[in-house]
Image: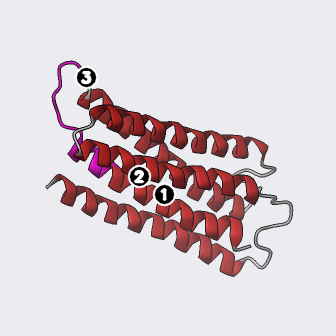
Amino acid sequence: MLRVGVVVWLASELMFFAGLFAGYFALRAVNHDWPPEGVELDAARTAAATAVLVASSFTMHLAVVASERRNERGAVRWTVATVVLGALFVANQAAEYAGLGFTYTTHAYGSIFYLMTGFHGLHVIGGLVLMLAVLAVGVGRTSRLPLEDPLTVTEFYWHFVDVVWLAMFATIYLLR
């Protein structure tokens, strides 16, 4: 039931992000200068951060495989690696925001850029909190909760967040 519930919830998240993409393309359709003059995004740096996020999907999968084999130490180790990679992605996003020459109030592009990437960043942070919560409950001294099911649904969520980012990266950074 947990897995079905998470898949249904992720379907609703997909609709949320679809609305953001629809907003982006609607704004792009009515603005002839897209992105506006003065918008300089570092696609190479963000591509490197994207590679880090994609790598985190592999480490998350390795955590689940370890939990399925009842290798708790391996599951914890790979989950911590995933948290570190996800935190690096978020840190890059924060550094990018700090260096941009526009804000969410500068123009429509700024509004949709920060809305899309900001909500995605919040979802990444939510995934990191979820992973830490699973680890805290699953490996706490008073808990004997197996990590397999919680890590599996966390993996569903994490892969979803990664796939959404790949679409977002292609839309914002490559389709100029």
Q: Position of residue 114 (x, y in %)?
A: 63, 54
Q: Are marks 2 and 3 in contact (CB under 8 Å)?
A: no
Q: Which residues are magenta?
A: 140-154
State the SS at label 1: helix
Q: Amino acid at mark 3?
A: Gly
Mark 1: amino acid: Asp
Identify the residue shown where x is 77% and y is 55%.
42
What residue is rendered at 71% in x and 40% in y?
Answer: 95
Which residue, given by chain and number where applicable, does mark 1 sit on? 162
- Mark pair 1, 2: CA separation: 6 Å
Quarter in which the N terminus is drawn: bottom left
Q: Give the residue type that dot 2 points to.
A: Trp
Counting the numbered discs, the total is: 3
In the rendered image, which residue does mark 3 sit on?
140
Looking at the image, residue 124 lies above or below residue 139: below
Label 2 SS: helix
Q: Secondary structure at mark 3?
A: loop
Quarter in which the C terminus is drawn: bottom right
Say few, some or many: other residues with alpha carbon within 10 Å of mark 1 (under 14 / 14 to 19 / 20 or more): some
Q: CA distance from mark 3 to mark 1?
A: 28 Å
Residue under pointer 2: 158
Residue in the image at 81% along x and 50% along y: 101
